[in-house]
Image: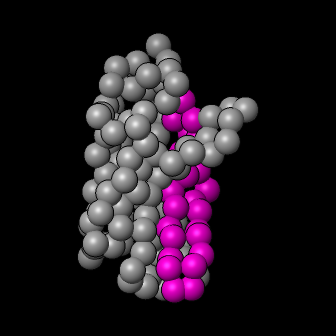
Amino acid sequence: QVDLVESGGGLVQPGGSLRLSCAAYGTIAIPYTMGWYRQAPGKERELVATISSTYITNYADSVKDRSAISREAAKNTIQLRMDSLKPEDTAVYYCNYHSYYPPRDYWGQGTHVTVSS
C-alpha cells in the first residue's frame, strides 16, 4: 500500500509559475515511476510529467519546454515546477505512483490549479 500526499496548487496568474510536491508513504519498491497527471473539466485525465526511480523523465508535449520534474530519493518525494502558465493549464493535478512488481497505480487526492487573472 502506498499513500500519496500532495501539496501546492491554487490560483496562479497567467505567465506565473507553479510548484507541486508529492510525498509517497508506505511500501516503496524499486523500480517505480512517480509523476503528475491532470484533468480539466470535461476532459480525460492526461499525463503531465513523470520521473522513474532511475531518474528517467517524460513530459507531455504541451509542457515540456516550461516544466521540470525532480525527485528526492531519500524522502520518496517528487516536485514539479511549471512556468509560463496558461489558462489551459487549469485542471485538477493528481500525483501518481506506479509500481512494476506487481503492476499497480496509486493516486493522490488531487490538487486544484486555476490559472486566471
Vertical order, 65 against 53 (above or below): above
**In the orientation shown, which residue stands out farthest toward the front?**
61
Q: Nearer the viewer, residue 91 or 31?
A: 31
Residue 69 x/y as whole percent: 31, 52
At 33% from the left edge and 73% from the top edge, which residue is drawn? 53
At 51% from the left edge and 86% from the top edge, which residue is drawn? 101
**Dominant secondary-structure state across the stretch colored magenta:** strand
The quarter holding residue 41 reads top right
Left or right, 98 with respect to 45, comes to left
At 34% from the left edge and 20% from the top edge, which residue is drawn? 15
Vertical order, 68 against 4 (above or below): above
The quarter holding residue 8 reads top left
Vertical order, 42 against 31 (above or below): above
Vertical order, 11 against 102 (above or below): above
Residue 112 covered by magenta stretch: yes
Residue 40 x/y as whole percent: 62, 34
Q: Is residue 114 visible?
A: no
**In the orientation shown, which residue stands out farthest toward the top?**
117
Residue 1 covered by magenta stretch: no
Magenta-drawn segment: 90-113
Left or right, 31 with respect to 26, comes to left
Q: Is residue 37 visible?
A: yes
